[in-house]
Image: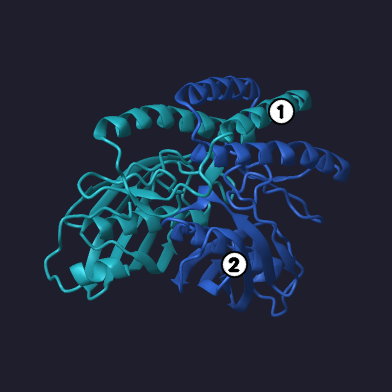
Chain colours: A blue, B cyan
Amino acid sequence: MAQFEIDEASDEEVARQSALYGPFTDAVRGLVDATIRTLVDDDEVRAAQAEIEAITERLRRRQLEGSFGVLYHPERRGRPWGNAVIGLRNPVAPPLTIEIDTSGRSWSDFHLGAAYEGPPGLVHGGVVSLVLDQMLGQAAGAGGRPGMTGTLTIVYRQGTPLGDLKAEAWIDRAEGIKTWAKGHIIGPDGVTAEAEGVFILPKWARERIASEEIVAPTPKYFE
Amino acid sequence: MAQFEIDEASDEEVARQSALYGPFTDAVRGLVDATIRTLVDDDEVRAAQAEIEAITERLRRRQLEGSFGVLYHPERRGRPWGNAVIGLRNPVAPPLTIEIDTSGRSWSDFHLGAAYEGPPGLVHGGVVSLVLDQMLGQAAGAGGRPGMTGTLTIVYRQGTPLGDLKAEAWIDRAEGIKTWAKGHIIGPDGVTAEAEGVFILPKWARERIASEEIVAPTPKYFE
């Protein structure tokens, strides 16, 4: 796939696939966590490896040639199911469930476990930036100004502990093809990291959006 | 674990564990990729899910209470095996194999597949920052100035295509407890993103390192 494709599935079909792939991908996320933390005997590890390889082989009998891409829809929210932060079908994604409103705000309550570690017990500084990039991008998109990241600056205030976290982002200002978004992550002891990003309207959206003063309803293509 | 612990394993034991967990974790990485891309029938997906849940349950019979933490060693390279970018035991990590030298340089050839997607066919902008945070941190550590990320700025020059990539980083300058590192990612069409980061010496290293003019041999604790 690996491109923006129009999502031709009916609402029912999307719901069906979501009910199938959501729990399946969650199971793989559980395995990812157990892979890092297991202390079972070597023979058990080797046996698990052989079984996992066999499952993978079966799953690969029919598969997409490349990456998942993004399925979008002119009316409902898109299906960025391969996305590394929010992808319903991507076990690398925690995943974040991000709420948005059309004033250009996004917010999320989420959990980061052992798979997102950098310094001991703390979220990897780069995972902090990964989450914030997605949050800021979705705030921009929610405000009708989708874009690719142009620059992203993270200021780290304190270590972000693994566990339950919050993130928020919002559009700070917009000018021509550029949108400035800001956001932060909040841990048990307050804000752990702040972000500012500039998002650049893609060419296909420029003519339509760049000249508008008023923030338009969200196209959501970049979720 | 979830802390800096001294690695008490012998070289032989580390080699043995590496030979066990390396291929095991690679198998889980293969499953992660197949999870995103599979097109097999629903029944096959459900069967795979049940098997994966059973494997996970077996692996969890004995496991670390929390995250992996970081095992370090005063002489050889440490074991940051849970790390989200380079962790040998972490299926979320691509993983990067990062070369370093004591002048404060790091470099890596690596591959990012479907699990790291943002826009269709492109690496997620936040994954770009994740990789660069790790690269810059290791350049700082390699130069004898390990640190937590203080600020990180990424400038995106073009989309980074999924596939084979290169990254490089180096210490730009150092002053007191701060180290400025720079780096970039290189794709088939040249530099895709540039980074600058400030890394702050942790308290335990300050007395020992902050006053030194000369860059010391690497403690490597933050790999």
Q: CA distance from mark 2 to mark 1?
A: 36 Å
Which of discs 2 and 1 lies nearer the camera? The answer is 1
What is the crowding at mark 1: few (fewer than 14 residues within 10 Å), some, or many (at least 20)? few
The residue under the point 12% across, 71% down is B213
- Residue farthest along the left direction in this orientation: B214
Rendered location of residue B133, percent (x, y): 39, 58
The residue under the point 60% across, 29% down is B58
Q: Chain of mark 1?
A: B
**Residue B155 against residue A113 in the figure, above or below:** below
Q: Report whether mark 2 lies on the same chain as mark 1.
A: no
Please give left or right for residue B143 compared with residue B110 in the image. Answer: left
Where is mark 1, residue-wise? B50
Q: Closest to the observer: B96 or B117? A: B96
Q: Amino acid at mark 1?
A: Ala
Please give left or right for residue B122 compared with residue B106 in the image. Answer: right
Q: Chain of mark 2?
A: A
Q: Amino acid at mark 2?
A: Leu
**Residue B107 against residue A54 in the figure, above or below:** below
